[in-house]
Image (cartoon, rainbow, N blue to C red):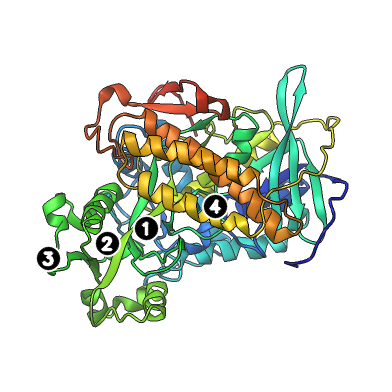
Amino acid sequence: MDGASYPVSPVQVVHSDVVVVGSGTAGMAAALALAQAGRKIRLLTKTDDLPGGSSLWAQGGVAVALGAGDSAADHAADTVAAGAGLTDPGMARLLAEAGIVEMSALLEAGLPADRGADGKPLLGREAAHGRHRILHAGGDATGRTLVTFLADRVRATPGISIHTRAAAADLVVRETGRGRRAQGVLAYEDGVGWVLHVAPHVVLATGGTGQLWAVTTNPPEATGDGLALAARAGAHLADLEFVQFHPTALAVAGPPGRRPLLTEALRGAGAKVLDAGGHAFMADEHPDAELAPRDVVARAIGRRVARGEKVFLDLRPLWAAGKSEKFPTVAGICAEAGLDPAAAPVPVAPAAHYHMGGVLTDADGRTSIPGLWAAGEVACTHVHGANRLASNSLLEAVVFAGRVAAALMAEPAAPQPVAVPDAPLVPGGTAAANLAAEAQLLMAEKVGLVRDGLGLAEAAERLQGLTLAAERLVPARDYAGIRAGLELRNRLLLSRLVVEAAKRREESRGAHTRADHPETRDAWRHHQILTYSDLGRVAEVEPATTRETRP
């Protein structure tokens, strides 16, 4: 319970076969697959209950080639085209092919889906998709429907021990004769204290980094924890500069934090983006108008917002045609904000949404540290390249969670002796919120939709200062304060790494736009791989299309 005071106590030690960190689609899907195979799982989440993460808020749906005339090859081709030259074609093919298998299995297992009179799933269309292939459940409540379905199964599955209000602090990595290996997670659990969760395998499924920015579609828990854990352990991170800004978050005033998203499916159904004069300007920006790739739409709206202009999403034709029933989440969002989409267009602006970068993995979720796995938004498989195709995120989480589970079960690891660390003192408490807000505003101003070298250099310098200030905070003693302190440490580290990656990529590509380097350059058609130590060194590069991947 928040406010309770805990003395710094000895670290408790518990053992399991696998520790899964995160309670969104990827975390719960991985835990289910592993438990059903007989593994003893500990599922850690810093949220109050299942489910957690951004999956809960996903409105758009799941992209999967289930429709007549569609194919995995077409889905993969659209994914590659959206990725601006950095999507691995093999990974795109794997995602599309395995996605059909995984989503068909979930539907067979009882996952609700919106269906037509013939009983077949209704499939919508979204930007940069050449076909109608977006599977919906509960209209625009697809993410909520999916994670609720998974959470019910997780709770009912023997072998999964659920630890809520458990904030992961660090990975435990042991030096062995064959190199370094992950051996567990140190976490602070509300009402319990510090706990070392020992296991030969750790799966990171902590989602993205949206809360690094002042305006985001992501929930409060999206503070980059998994990436920071992996970075401090020495793992390789990739593509950190590529942050997708959703074009149409509801433009409402408020402090830094989450803004409601207005799903891309609205534009797929015919909604138009208007300027203050009522002109549908996207037709002037791209041949596909409202269905242009997300980065194109976001920049077009962002330019106008930066000039102090207002931009609107016109839902009146949809509401007049009775389509509001297909978008109950959007209808509720607008009603809560005091807006009537049937009467007037609603104000929108871009918001930090999805991170194409993450902990570098192979096709089975292996990271550069044996025993450490990653799946979902926290991972970087190069399937998204420089710009994620709409509605590929939930599919990615399901597909790669399954692949992690299958590969992990084929690589049993014998338990090894573990050195128990001392309980750390975490600088944090209420003062951490002020530093976090300052960092969010800095990232929004200097590392947003459009960046430049001078702004990135300033951001790097100021983030170092905030990092030093965070270290001087009074140590926290309760769960709320310790969680805030851990999140601040994570967000500052990840912000510095994102800035470093953005500084080094001197071109504009996909979701990464440099005002001082506006052209896309062939010389930069490669992935940047960074580690924690690379904050002071030259990054390695990896060719964009050299990895061979097979389903």
Residue 435's mark?
A: 4
Seen at 61% across and 50% down, the residue is 487
Q: Distance between the Cα atoms at labels 2 and 4?
A: 39 Å
Q: Examine the image and state in which quarter residue 517 appears.
A: top left
Residue 268's mark?
A: 2
Q: Nearer the viewer, residue 39 or 315?
A: 315
Query: Residue flagged by tag 4: what amino acid is it?
Result: Leu
Secondary structure of the residue carrying numbered label 2: helix
Residue 282 screen position, x and y as percent: 17, 56
* Circle 2 residues within 10 Å: few <14, some 14–19, many ≥20: some
Residue 524 screen position, x and y as percent: 32, 25
Residue 465 screen position, x and y as percent: 53, 40
In the depicted structure, whether residue 40 falls above or below residue 411: below
CB-based contact (under 8 Å), mark 1 and mark 4: no
Secondary structure of the residue carrying numbered label 3: loop
Secondary structure of the residue carrying numbered label 4: helix
Closer to the eye: label 2 or 4: 4
Label 1 sits on residue: 134
Seen at 55% across and 51% down, the residue is 223
Name the N-terminal-most of marks 2 and 4.
2
Inspect this view and state whether residue 171 appears.
yes
Q: Distance between the Cα atoms at labels 3 and 2?
A: 18 Å
Label 3 sits on residue: 279
Q: Examine the image and state in which quarter residue 7 appears.
A: bottom right
Name the N-terminal-most of marks 3 and 4.
3
Name the N-terminal-most of marks 1 and 2.
1
